[in-house]
Amino acid sequence: MLPSPCYHHVMHIVLVVAGTNEPSNSNVLADSFSEGLRHEPEITVRKFRLKDMKIDHFSLSHYEPHSPEEEDMKYLRESIESAAGLVVATPVWNFGVPAHLKNVIDRMGSFGLDETHSRGTLKGLPFFLIFTGGAPAPAWKGMLRKTTSFVCEGLRYFGATHIGTHFEPRCTLGRGKFGLAVDKRPESLEKVRADGEQFARIAATYARTGRLPAHSSLHHKGYALAQRLLAKFH
């Protein structure tokens, strides 16, 4: 008897890049992360450059059933809903992220929350964040991590699981001079590539088994429990 054929389960990871410049420090780091993702043979990458997409500003009408949906938003939504993982790469400008990323997070509420808008629906989807900024690393630890925390917390609220964050400091060509800097940092590029490789393994395991790393799973379960408790008083 011939052996049964072995089929590989193809899965994809959504990579959202919010950088608006060209060339973009965020995009270069995202590409390095993507190189790591592709070390997992089952993984494909769907990359979205928000600057090139047409997505309407959020309004409450987007929460209505069968609300009209732009083609770009429809493809992004369908990709996230069927993804094994989600990666967001974004610059930090003036203590926050580009407006189109905040808008996408707002729009995600139409499918990332249940009908009560109080419970996430992304079922533990693992996600990773990449931030770039002109400030030094201490500024990230002391301030910028707080001012951009809604990106992480929004995705967690939608039911996703935070796996890790990379912040790349001093992404400038000199004092007050902005431009592409990370392409000359082989250590940073290799660090992000390694992060991508590790994330791919986590995402592939999640897609096959529904299991996440113990510490991430514990945090996710704790967050989900808090959501359920809060929903009782909503």
Image: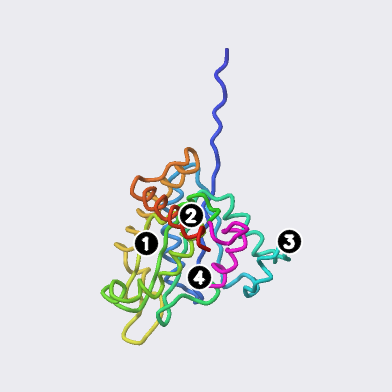
Q: Are marks 2 and 1 in contact (CB under 8 Å)?
A: no
Describe the element under mark 4 as helix, strand or loop.
loop
Describe the element under mark 2 as helix, strand or loop.
helix
Name the residue located 42 percent from the left edge and 56 percent from the top edge: 223
Cα separation, mark 3 vs mark 1, equals 35 Å
Cα separation, mark 2 vs mark 1, equals 26 Å
Side of 227 relative to 144 (left or right)? right
Q: Which one is in front in this view, the residue at disc 2 or the one at disc 1?
A: 2
The residue beneath circle 2 is: 228
Quarter of the rendering containing residue 80: bottom right
Magenta span of residues: 102-119
Using a 10 Å C-alpha cutoff, classify the residue at mark 1 as few (fewer than 14 neighbours), some (14 to 19) or many (20 or more): some
Q: Position of residue 134 (x, y in %)?
A: 35, 78
**Residue closest to the eye, 77 or 221:** 221
The dominant secondary structure in magenta is helix
- Residue 115: give its label: none
Mark before the other along the chain sequence, 2 or 1: 1
Q: Which one is in front in this view, the residue at disc 3 or the one at disc 2?
A: 2
- The amino acid on which the numbered mark 3 sits, given as a three-letter code, is His
The residue beneath circle 4 is: 18
- The amino acid on which the numbered mark 2 sits, given as a three-letter code, is Arg
- Residue 66: give its label: 3
Describe the element under mark 3 as helix, strand or loop.
loop
Please tell me whether residue 52 is drawn above or below residue 213 in the rendered image: below
